[in-house]
Amino acid sequence: MHTPRFFWDHTLIVGNDITPPSDVTHHLLRVLRMKKGGELTFFNGDGYEYRGTITSINRFKVSIAIVSSASISRESRLTSRLGLCILKRHAMESALTRATELGVSEITPLVSSRTNVRIPGEAHWQRVIQSSCEQCGRNTLPVLKKASTIANWLATTTGNIKIVANPLSKRLLDDLESDSPTMCILVGPEGGLSCEEIENAEANGFLSVSLGKRVLRAETAPATLMSLAQYRWGDISR
């Protein structure tokens, strides 16, 4: 039986009791219909999983005892830094979710020349990432960097393989040689990167890479690149 997982943005100590916030309590009692004695898992980003047991339920309040902890890593051996141009709300949420599920190490939202959306508070993006970690089992959250311009990110990000998604390129990911890369991946917004932005990326050591004959949506491209990279260098088995 699947044990529910929840992110807890506080210190967790075996032997202590915690009282979840109202939204988690509602989910436990009204959605999952959990009872006293029910087990669940918490994580707070420190790399550990904490097993909890419901000790009491008082209508709108639940008390949970933290009974054990275990250091469990589900992180990829591939270090990947994603420069993701800011997309429309639901597309951005989808891109963040899929990248997190696929083991991305770091995400920097980028403002491009074609960014034409209201930028939400980064706390919202952080919650999307936390929710994705709850689902996929990661106990270490990918780092969400502050939003940046493309030019600044290109000039400061580091990695021994740097790629930019470019549908006009003839180069494929399989053409790149490296045993254990640290990857930087740049993906454009709806409408794609401008010619100047691609030229700037190439001037900063990025290699243009094609994702095939079809043009992928902006929220699909990062998941595709992450999947291919994890298959070749990471923890998705061949």
Image (cartoon, rainbow, N blue to C red):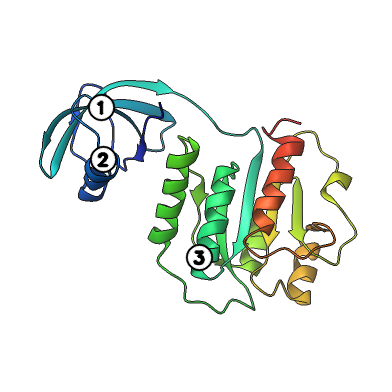
Q: Is residue 193 above or below residue 163?
A: below
Q: Residue at x 26, y 40 (%)?
A: 28
Q: Label 2 is placed on what type of residue?
A: Leu
Residue 84 percent across, percent down from the top left: 61, 61
Mark in front: 3 vs 1: 1
Left/right placement of residue 17 relative to residue 238 reads: left
Residue 100 percent across, percent down from the top left: 54, 46
Q: Disc number at residue 28?
A: 2
Sequence-first tag of 2 and 3:
2
Where's the C terminus, which quadrant? top right
Q: Give the Cα separation between the discs numbered 2 and 1.
A: 10 Å
Callout 3–callout 1 Cβ contact below 8 Å: no
Binning the other alpha carbons within 10 Å of mark 1 as few (below 14), some (14 to 19) or many (20 upward) gives some
Q: Which residue is mark 3?
A: 90
Residue 4 percent across, percent down from the top left: 36, 34
Q: Residue at x 62, y 53 (%)?
A: 82
Q: Which residue is mark 1?
A: 38
Binning the other alpha carbons within 10 Å of mark 3 as few (below 14), some (14 to 19) or many (20 upward) gives few
